Amino acid sequence: MDGRWVSVEEVASHLGVVKETVYRWIEKRGLPAHRVGRLWKFQLAEVDDWVKSGDANGGEESHATESQGRNGAPRSRNQAADNGQG
């Protein structure tokens, strides 16, 4: 495991979001971060665990896969009903 500490910019790039989102997630959603002087530092393993735990969704589990068709595209309500689901 890479124990290197990374910056806000690197976490934002890793997660595909902007820096402001990282700061907001630290404050409101408990993104694991460590203050070093004026800087925030992160362990990517902690960040990845946080995302996998569902905390990135505000504590709500994602149900996106339940409403997707075979090709991963969202199914319409009618498609689900036609298949006996929904």
Image (cartoon, rainbow, N blue to C red):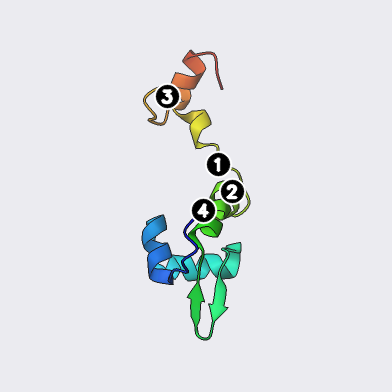
Q: Position of residue 56 (x, y in %)?
A: 55, 54
Give the mark nearest the N terminus, 4 or 3: 4
Q: Position of residue 38 (x, y in %)?
A: 50, 85
Amino acid at dot 1: Ser
Q: CA distance from mark 1 to mark 2?
A: 7 Å
* Camera-nearest label, 4 or 3: 4
Quarter of the image with the C terminus is top right
Callout 2: few (<14), some (14-19), or many (20+) C-alpha neighbours within 10 Å? few
* Camera-nearest label, 1 or 2: 2
Amino acid at dot 4: Asp
Give the mark nearest the N terminus, 3 or 2: 2
Q: Position of residue 73 (x, y in %)?
A: 38, 30
Asked if marks 3 and 2 touch (Cβ < 8 Å), the reply is no
Tell me the residue at 52%/56% (across/down). 45
Amino acid at dot 3: Gly
* Camera-nearest label, 1 or 4: 4
Q: CA distance from mark 3 to mark 1?
A: 16 Å
Quadrant hosting residue 75: top left
Give the mark nearest the N terminus, 1 or 4: 4
The residue labelled by disc 1 is 62
Give the mark nearest the N terminus, 1 or 2: 2
Callout 4: few (<14), some (14-19), or many (20+) C-alpha neighbours within 10 Å? some
Give the mark nearest the N terminus, 4 or 2: 4
Q: Assign a secondary structure to mark 1.
A: loop
Q: Nearest the camera: 82 or 40? A: 40
Q: Nearest the camera: 31 or 35? A: 35
The residue labelled by disc 2 is 54
